């Protein structure tokens, strides 16, 4: 600003030193030229200011996203959230061991065409949780429903985490134990997707994001090879060592393509 004022102040004395024949009006050409110069400088200043403001806004948004991820990580590792994780994983483990329960579980993710609790799964459900060992009938179904509500919380948690995909580097370096959750969640996700694709009624009434969309985003963030087709998913599930350790239901092998049987 000081430099601009100095140039303006020097304009008239400089004009006085120039010969009269250089221009008919000593003020017009000089000040017109200076006006053009200062207008250009002002416009350039505005552009530079906007550039810096946009850059600062981008940095602020990124910092806000990263801060929210760290807050989610603190929630994930808290003692209070451990009950949610335990209950949700217990439900998914039941789905690993019993495909009929997995089908039931996938159906409950939709508001229509829901299946009833499979009575044949009752013994397995009781065996995986000491608190359910003496429950039967409606009491057992109610206890299982409570665990499934915890699974809903975990699905919402991972869905919110996936929305932070712009900070994939931060997500990747926070231990959300995704490698443990990924195989069991993909069972549920693929069964849900197949039900959705096969039912016009579900497609009409159910608009919530599918679990598979969340997992694809997190797979990319964590650097996992994408599972592009149903065959890819069922191969991954049937070949996964941890799922084999969990006694994966042999019924899942029937979902492999004929060439893999």
Image (tube, grey):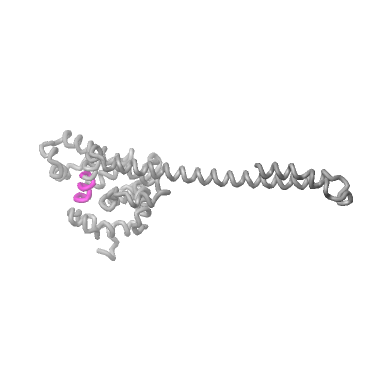
Q: How many marks?
A: 0
* Outermost residue, left side: 134
The secondary structure that most of the magenta stretch takes on is: helix
Rendered-image quadrant of the N terminus: top right
> Which of 59/73 is in front?
59
Decide whether residue 97 is among the magenta residues. yes
Q: Write the residue at 26% across / 56% down.
A: 237
Is residue 82 visible to the viewer in this orientation of the structure? Answer: yes
Decide whether residue 201 is among the magenta residues. no
Give percent across and percent down for residue 251: 21, 55
Q: Magenta stretch?
A: 90-98
> Which of 38/228 is in front?
38
* Outermost residue, bottom side: 259
Q: In which quarter of the image is residue 64?
A: top left
The answer to whether residue 110 is left or right of residue 84 is right
> Which of 236/81 is in front?
81
Give percent across and percent down for residue 47: 61, 46
Give percent across and percent down for residue 144: 20, 38
Is residue 197 visible to the viewer in this orientation of the structure? Answer: no
Location of residue 260 with respect to 217 vertically, above or below: below
The answer to whether residue 119 is left or right of residue 173 is left
> Which of 57/216 is in front?
57
Q: Write the residue at 32% across / 59% down.
A: 232
Give percent across and percent down for residue 125: 16, 43
């Amino acid at each position: 600003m000081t430099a601009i004022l100095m140039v303006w102040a020097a304009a008239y004395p400089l004009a006085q030193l120039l010969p009269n024949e250089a221009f008919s009006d000593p003020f017009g050409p000089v000040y017109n030229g200076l006006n053009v110069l200062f207008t250009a400088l002002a416009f350039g200043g505005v552009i530079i200011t906007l550039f810096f403001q946009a850059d600062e806004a981008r940095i602020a948004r990124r910092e806000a996203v990263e801060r929210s991820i760290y807050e989610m990580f603190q929630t994930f590792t808290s003692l209070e959230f451990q009950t949610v994780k335990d209950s949700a994983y217990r439900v998914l483990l039941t789905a690993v061991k019993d495909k009929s329960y997995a089908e039931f579980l996938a159906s409950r993710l939709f508001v229509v065409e829901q299946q009833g609790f499979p009575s044949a799964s009752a013994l397995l459900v009781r065996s995986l949780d000491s608190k359910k060992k003496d429950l039967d009938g409606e009491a057992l179904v109610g206890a299982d429903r409570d665990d499934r509500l915890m699974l809903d919380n975990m699905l919402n948690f991972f869905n919110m985490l996936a929305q932070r995909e712009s900070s994939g580097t931060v997500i990747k370096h926070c231990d959300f134990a995704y490698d443990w959750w990924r195989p069991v969640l993909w069972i549920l996700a693929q069964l849900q997707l197949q039900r959705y694709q096969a039912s016009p009624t579900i497609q009409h009434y159910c608009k919530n994001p599918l679990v598979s969309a969340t997992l694809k985003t997190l797979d990319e963030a964590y650097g996992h090879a994408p599972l592009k087709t149903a065959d890819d998913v069922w191969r991954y599930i049937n070949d996964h060592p941890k799922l084999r350790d969990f006694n994966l239901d042999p019924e899942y092998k029937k979902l492999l393509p004929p060439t893999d049987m």
